Amino acid sequence: MKIDLVGMGSGTPGSLTVQGLAALRGAGLIIGARRLLEKLPDGCTGNRALLYKAEEICALLQTTPAVQVAVAYSGDTGFYSGAAALCRALDAQGLAYTVHPGLSSVQLMAAALGRPWQGWKLVSAHGCTCAPAAVCGADAPTFFLTGGIETPAALCAKLTQSGCGEVAATVGENLGTDDQRLVAGTVQELAQQQFAALSVLLVEPCPVLSRRVPGLPDEAFLRGKTPMTKQEVRAAVLAKLAVRPGDTLWDVGAGTGSVSVEMALAAPQGEVWAAECDADACELIRQNRIKFAAENLHLCEGTAPAVLADWPAPDAAFIGGSKGNLRAIVDAALEVNPSVRLCISAIALETLQQAIAALAAHGLTAQVTQIAVSRTKAAGSLHLLMANNPVFLIVRE
């Protein structure tokens, strides 16, 4: 069997490469999404299957009598395309295939604007939550592949809330088709408009907050009278958790949200779920979320572990407060992900003992680190060291 994966660009026959067109016309079976199957060029077989999931396509390939099969994809097969998953599935089954790339939406946008795109930052917000202010930079435009709830207007609304409302941006609708349209304006202006489902967004360089991650200065946060994890401890927590850009993260007992914010900035393509039961602390978390443009930070007001029930499984979790429910919180995190990277903070010896016991109940060994930080305070012409409370960080080995 000959298998071809074809990038159809904008989905119009005129945007196909010569090789892609030949593969489609030579196929005895064409597989793809409805929009693409309805726009196939003349001369293609009428034997078509409306499928797009890799496992379903592989199952059909096992039973079809066709000797030449083409699988159609929109845009380019190498730019946030479902072709990647099918390639891996075909590799696993030992099936040979040929990939024919197509015109990507970023190429079509650059061509429509008459600009090069090699310096653009490329981000997919298609079918996933996106924190645009966390990924936009001051040194280059940012291109967003949009879709689902993350429309160009929704992304622009988030950027406006983060203080980037006056930044210039352009929306490209139905690129590469007869209905192509470019809409330019400020981010704030575009947030008030509606656009076609097939749209992309280009945001010009944005002013960015001065950030040091991990370990933002304590005074950078709004804190009121709520206890806060101090700068040096926060830096150690993120190091212990080994936060990665796409991680799903938990912060239980979030306080002012200082750790939650640091997590959100360190994982701009991921999500942070924060639990806090104190109403005043929750309001501080909301304010700090806005201040640091941490749109990927989700706050749930309530007591753990009950409030954790509907959360997605974490890659890493920080437990800064437990209201006496430490064992149950550890159980909840390990139940949804036995490999979760855990870090528990404690200032009381009793909490330290509870953390070690909670991990031991799962057959896990605890690694304990004590952090004792002192800072200088001027006393006349002298500088004295003033000690903060020692903090224990307990992680699983």
Image (tube, rainbow, N blue to C red):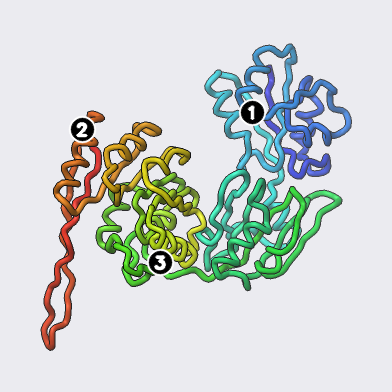
* Disc with the residue nearer the chain's start (2 vs 3): 3
Residue ID at (19%, 46%): 351
Q: Mark 2 points at which residue?
A: 360
Q: Mark 1 points at which residue?
A: 53
Q: Name the residue under label 3.
A: 211
Check whether the beta carbons of the residues at disc 2 and disc 3 lie within 8 A of each other: no
Q: Nearer the viewer, mark 2 or mark 3?
A: 2
Q: Which of 186 and 345 is in front in this view?
A: 345
User: CA gap, disc 3 to disc 1?
Assistant: 40 Å
Q: Which of 373 and 12 is in front in this view?
A: 373
Residue 82: image quadrant is top right
* Disc with the residue nearer the chain's start (3 vs 1): 1
Query: What secondary structure is marked by label 3?
Result: loop
Give the number of the disc on residue 13: none
Residue ID at (72%, 59%): 171
* Disc with the residue nearer the chain's start (1 vs 2): 1
Residue type, label 2: Ala
Instruction: Give neighbour class at mark 3: few <14, some 14-19, many 20+ (Cα, 10 Å).
Output: few
Q: Which of marks 1 and 2 is in front?
A: 2
Residue 368 placement (x, y as % from top left)? 17, 45
